[in-house]
Amino acid sequence: MSDATIEEVAGEALLEPLPDEGDPGRGRTLFSAWHLILLPLAFVMIIPLLWMVVTSFETLNETRQFPPVLVPGSLRWQNYRDVLEQAPFARWFLNTLFVTVLVVIGNLIFCSLAGYAFARLKFFGRDVIFLLVLATLMIPFQVIMIPTFLIVRQLGLIDTLGALIVPNLAGAFGIFLLRQFFRTLPIELEEAARIDGASRLGILFKIVLPLSGPALATLAVITFMWTWNDFLWPLVTLYSEKNFTLQLGLTTFTGAHQSNTHLLMAANVMSMLPLLLLFFVAQRWFIRGIATTGLKG
Amino acid sequence: MNARRILQSEHVVGWAFAFPAVLLIVVFGIVPIIWSALMSFQRTNLLSTPDWIGLDNYRALSKDPLFKTSAIHAVIYAALFVPLSVGGGLFAAIALNRRVVGMRFYRIAVFVPVVASTIATAIMFLWLFDSHFGLANWALEKVGLGPFGFFTSPNGALYSIVVMTVWGWVGFNAIIYLAALQGVPQELLEAASIDGAKSWSIFRNVTLPLLGPATLFLVVFTSINAIQLFDEVYFLTLGGPGTATYVPVFYLFQLAFQQGIAGYAAAIAYVLLVVILVLTAIQLWVGKRMVYYSS
């Protein structure tokens, strides 16, 4: 695919209405044979989540029965309290939130700056550098994690949250996404501001970024999800329990509570809650983000 | 030129804007790619000074039975995961691209697993697939099957991981297919329908070819994904029972971070990198030849 088409497609994808925004209510059919396919499909997809939530309210005794108890005798909120008392979940939650928020902010700032430079400024070596950035987009982290570990150790960041933050403050995905979006914006506004004597930084922050809400929101939710859910890198770099993220904490908690299924499910619900809430609030940005991932190739 | 002019030149401003991000990408992206290559020719344990040993790591790799086992598992896993998750995504997207009551609910149900982390998903399926009290065995018993050991079964563990990860990825693939389906020009479908084509024939001859780019992307993307399988194996099976779920990244992780054989692990990483680059090249090559690519 030629460069021009990638740009147009990826940039426009962020502007066009996406599946979630079409009005599924318009001209809808009440009874359709599709329900016979959709209902079982939705059922299968939702069962693991539903079963987790149900189990998180059961007693230990109720989880040790076969056939399984499908409806708990009562809503045992106590399970959630027990989890918080038996493991430093609050600490892990704050660690994860701290890392995630900083990484999201870092990506928004640094990818905006770089994305704007690659989209609008002609500077020495630009095209070569951009090609290098694109090259890293294709390399999965697993393949380079051994030397990355050595570099992060050299920086004295092992077993600190910095190990999760510093290397992830900017990324090829964000730069690419924002560059493509900036290129779809009308350049006339920027030119007018230049004539009025505005600096590039002023143009970026006062003209370009305010018009880039969809792209910034997309980058923010996707980065949030990746960082919140990351497992391998924290596993390699963090050793002390007090520095764990939720994903790491969940694994040690599972090890210690192998047979306390009700507590395990309560812990799992808590770990997923922020992302589930974000998904319901910002569903369209998740969908845009994923649809854009699909276009990056 | 005075100082102010120089400071405002596009060269200076461009570099100043790009520098922080580019520095991060060079230090944590480009340097590790090159360093990995060098390490794969060394004997090193991450602590002492490395020895240069040429191609010895790669020679050893070609004779390593555990690497062979891991690679075979990766191929089996990919051969199931890719068609099931891509096919499942296409099926879900077609069903979700209707105007029927309750669509908002159906879409949420299919999309929501996308935000579940690998560990959260593994915890859910550990319980669902519990050999004594699991919901799956209960349902299977009703139809006269099982009980199965799932993750604890030497013959079933890898397939259980396939089922779980397909569940986790169908929503992602469905979103990409749904976006592609919305891009299919309505006039084309109407024209075909006026010409008297049956709906299956319209799907087969009009819609499916137009979904070609999305399919190509997803097949390559999910294949690269399959090669990266790690979290689920580490959390659920540690490569077991026996070596039933050993996969390359898990083996690489053990070698580098638990046994300190980093050079050898880097050689595995580079083999994976080459496989991934070949897949990407195939994607670009096939993509260029696709008739409907830029419509």
Image (spheres, coloured by chain):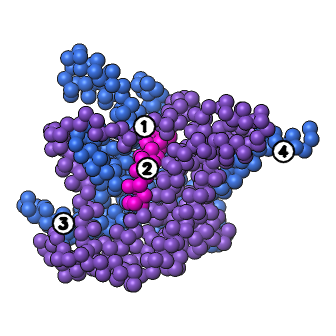
Chain colours: A purple, B blue
Q: Nearer the viewer, mark 4 or mark 1?
A: 1
* Label 4 sits on residue: B7
**Distance of label 2 from label 3 (alpha carbons):** 30 Å
* Label 2 sits on residue: A286
In which quarter of the view is residue B121 placed? bottom left
Q: Which residues are magenta?
A: A275-297
Q: In terms of secondary structure, where does tag 3 sit?
A: helix
In the rendered image, residue B106, in percent from the top left (x then y), is placed at 26, 48
Which residue is at 12% across, 71% downward? A67
Can residue A91 be spotted in the picture? yes
Q: Main secondary structure of the magenta part?
A: helix
In the rendered image, residue A289, in percent from the top left (x then y), is placed at 46, 46
Which residue is at 31% across, 44% downward? B89
Which residue is at 36% across, 25% downward? B185
Name the residue type under label 2: Phe
Above or below, B140 against B207 in this view is below
Assess whether residue B134 is covered by the magenta stretch: no
Name the residue type under label 1: Pro
